[in-house]
Image (spheres, rainbow, N blue to C red):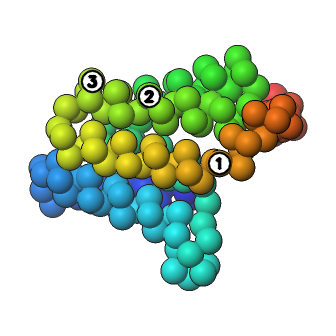
C-alpha cells in the first residue's frame, strides 16, 4: 500500500525521462502526498514506507540499503520508530553513495528532515523511555 505510493510514481518517471530532477520532484510529490493528503484534511502518515518506496524506485541498491539498515536496527533495538529514524538519517549518504546527483541528495535530505518532524512524538517517547517496542505479535507468523 504505502510503499507503492512512493514506488510507482518514481518508476513511471523512469519510463519518461532520465532526469534526476524529475525523479527527485516525483519522489517528493509522492512523499508529501502521503504526509499531507488533501482527501484526509492534510492528516497523513509518518512516511516511512512511502519514502522507502521512492528509494526503491530510484535504485534497488538505495532502497535495499535503507531497508537492511531498518531491519538490522529493528532486530537489535526492538523499536520500529528508532529503526526508521536511523535508516532515514543515513539515507542521504546512501543516495550520495549510489547516485550522487545533487537533486537526489537534496530531496533525500528534505525527506529525512520531514520524516523526523513527523516522528517528533516518537522521539519524545524514546527520550522519556516510553516508546513501545516491537512485539512478537507484530512480526510475521512463523
82 vs 31: above or below: above
* Crowdedness near tag 2: few (<14), some (14–19) or many (≥20) residues, C-alpha within 10 Å: some
Q: Quadrant of residue 26?
A: bottom left
From the viewer's perspective, tell me whether residue 76 is left or right of residue 117.
right
- Circle 2 — which element? helix
- The quarter of the rendered structure image containing the N terminus is bottom right
Q: Quadrant of residue 134?
A: top right
Q: Which mark is residue 20?
A: none
Total numbered circles? 3
Q: Which residue is drawn at the image coordinates 31% and 48% (left, top)?
A: 107
Residue labelled with disc 2: 90
83 vs 115: above or below: above
Residues tagged 2 and 3 counted as in contact (Cβ below 8 A): no
Distance CA(mark 1)–CA(mark 3) = 28 Å
Please tell me which of labels 2 and 3 falls first in the chain.
2
131 or 99, which is in the foreground? 131
- Circle 1 — which element? helix
36 or 39, which is in the foreground? 36
Q: Which residue is drawn at the image coordinates 75% and 33% (left, top)?
A: 127
131 or 142, which is in the foreground? 131
Residue labelled with disc 3: 97
Q: Which residue is drawn at the image coordinates 56% and 51% (left, top)?
A: 117
Residue labelled with disc 1: 120
Distance CA(mark 2)–CA(mark 3) = 11 Å
Q: Quadrant of residue 56?
A: top left
Distance CA(mark 2)–CA(mark 1) = 18 Å
Amino acid at each position: 500500500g504505502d510503499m507503492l505510493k512512493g514506488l510507482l510514481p518514481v518508476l513511471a518517471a523512469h519510463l519518461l525521462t532520465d532526469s534526476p530532477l524529475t525523479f527527485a520532484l516525483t519522489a517528493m510529490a509522492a512523499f508529501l502526498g502521503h504526509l499531507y493528503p488533501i482527501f484526509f484534511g492534510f492528516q497523513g502518515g509518518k512516511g516511512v514506507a512511502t519514502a522507502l518506496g521512492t528509494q526503491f524506485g530510484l535504485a534497488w541498491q538505495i532502497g535495499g540499503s535503507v531497508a537492511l539498515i531498518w531491519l538490522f536496527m529493528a532486530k537489535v533495538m526492538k523499536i520500529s520508530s528508532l529503526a526508521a529514524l536511523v535508516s532515514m538519517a543515513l539515507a542521504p549518504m546512501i543516495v550520495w553513495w549510489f547516485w550522487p546527483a545533487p537533486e537526489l541528495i537534496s530531496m533525500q535530505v528534505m525527506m529525512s528532515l520531514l520524516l523526523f518532524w513527523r516522528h517528533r512524538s516518537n522521539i519524545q517517547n524514546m527520550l522519556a523511555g516510553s516508546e513501545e517496542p516491537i512485539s512478537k505479535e507484530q512480526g510475521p507468523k512463523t
